[in-house]
Image (cartoon, rainbow, N blue to C red):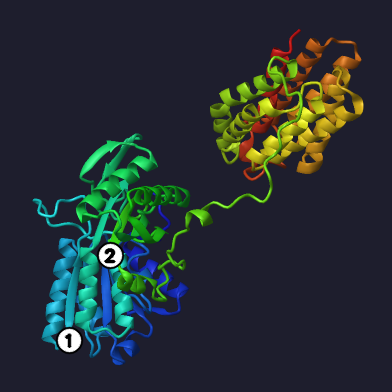
Amino acid sequence: MKKLINEVAHVVPDMLAGLAALHPQLALLEDKNIVLRTDAREAAAQGQVALISGGGSGHEPAHGGYVGRGMLSAAVAGEVFTSPSTDAVLDAIRAVAGPAGVLLIVKNYTGDRLNFGLAAEIARAEGIAVDMVVVADDVALSANGDHAGRRGLAGTVLVHKIAGAAAAGGATLAQVAQAARDAAAALGTMGVALTPCTVPAAGKPGFTLSEGEIEWGLGIHGEAGVERGQLVTAGDAVERLLLQITDDLKLQAGERVALLVNNLGGTPASELDIVAGAALTLLTTRGIKVERAWAGTFLSALEMAGISLTLLRVDEQRLALLDAATQAPAWPAGSGRIATDAQASLQAVAAAPATARGATLSPASPLARAIDAVCACLQQAEARLTDMDQQVGDGDLGISMTRAAQGIRENMPGWPSERDPAAVLRAMSATVRRVVGGTSGPLYAILLMRGAAALEQHGADAHAWAAALREAVNGVMQLGGAKPGDRTMVDALLPAADALQQALASGADVDKALAAAATAAEQGTAATAAMTPRRGRSSYIGQRALGHPDPGAHAVALWLAALRDVLKS
């Protein structure tokens, strides 16, 4: 188990202390795992209904992150995935209760219902007006199945927001509770997990999944779901989740909803955006109008990779409550309004590169065949280059080279004729800089630009091509700042350029000169394994790169070998 914690027993208090330290509007009840609004008692004294939620920890930013004006007055934190005790809930009630009373918002888990419910009974006996709303938005479980009831999931956060806004607006306890119940009844949530999670006290995952497996319809406590299946695309996952939610809620075309795309803990933001885009498209296709949508980490299951989707029926009154201001730190700053089609796709300012006028590059020409051979070898080497780059860099070289190759192959038919090789190189440079970012894109773009400029000056015989390569390498060194021995692509490029010029100068034919250049690149690449990196992808890991040849140099050796082979006379 690898976690950034101090001691297992101190995870919850340490976490809450950090939360309160980061947000001055929050405070901790002394010696308790209870987060409060610093102005909670003042608000209660002024007649505002107090809102309390909570449950087991491990669901961050829930529940402490939703404490603040416009949402919760307090949150009670149990140990990881364990309901807080009755007395802890009672302490929170006593801390924030005022004349208007207290509403408890509880997720439908047995421990939470029992402890919050008993605390409510005791508080009522002490003369405190307390009501309780239970959220059970998990549509993966049948409404009347042989189980403890549908679980409360990420939709609970929307109930916090709606009830909190109602309370902040001066509603009575009965009115706030009714708004919360109505919202809970209009909710549906279902999730899918790609990995399990590890409870610190347990030290091992709650269940196991093989590389190609996922878990459908799970809760938020690391427990297994209702079904195990094979890994599917984001679009297919979204379709299954939304179909179950819309069927359960009996949503019809023309109805209005709010969408919550929730990260279960370990899902990258890029994947959340992919899921959100797919969900918005699917709902729009079905005629369901998405009035508000948010994607982020709202109610997690520690580091579990996966997502849940929530739909909430909305009307103007409910939208106003969702839109109301709040100081709760975990509620997203954005309005939740989604882009229209016109906003989502704006015309680029720069026009796409123009295709060549007149004659275009013949696929049968030596130049076209050479370019295609380079592209083919780079695409075939994607996995190898990726593996090499993962050992010493950021792992993106293989895909960058493949993007370049794909872009070149797609654009080649419109390029100028082989009779103007400099124009061909300029067109190739434009393609590379458009489709490849990172470091590889600009370096290969300058390589091709400088080569084109040299050909325009010196013609296009073998000696001119050799001079163009040497000038192109100078451009790479000037732009990238690398020198021989820095452990970069230069350590393959420069020896190859020198070998090509020297072989031709000594009277060797083109075949032998290309062979000499390819061999020099291979030898230069091998030498990088013993070099301490000073530039490029490996410079960040220093001595740990020793023993591994530079991936960028290896790519150069590959395409030079491809040129040697395809241009044999």
Q: Is residue 84 above or below residue 467?
A: below
C-alpha gap between disc 1 and disc 2: 24 Å
Where does residue 558 sit, x and y in percent of width and height? Answer: 66, 22
Crowding at mark 1 (Cα within 10 Å: few <14, some 14-19, many 20+): some
Residue 445 visible to an observer of this rendering: yes
Q: Nearer the viewer, mark 1 or mark 2?
A: 2
Can you name the residue that lies furthest to the top here? 569
* 447 to the left or right of 336: right
Q: Residue at x 86, y 27 (%)?
A: 455
User: Which secondary structure, mark 1?
Assistant: loop
Please tell me which residue lies in front, 255 or 311: 255
Please tell me which residue lies in front, 119 or 313: 313
User: Which secondary structure, mark 2?
Assistant: helix
* 475 to the left or right of 187: right
Please tell me which residue lies in front, 158 or 98: 158
Q: Is residue 314 above or below residue 206?
A: below
Label ID, residue 156: 2
The residue tagged 1 is 128
In which quarter of the view is residue 535 placed?
top right
Q: Label 2 amino acid?
A: Thr
Residue 74 visible to an observer of this rendering: no
Q: Label 1 amino acid?
A: Ile
Q: Is residue 20 above or below residue 551?
A: below
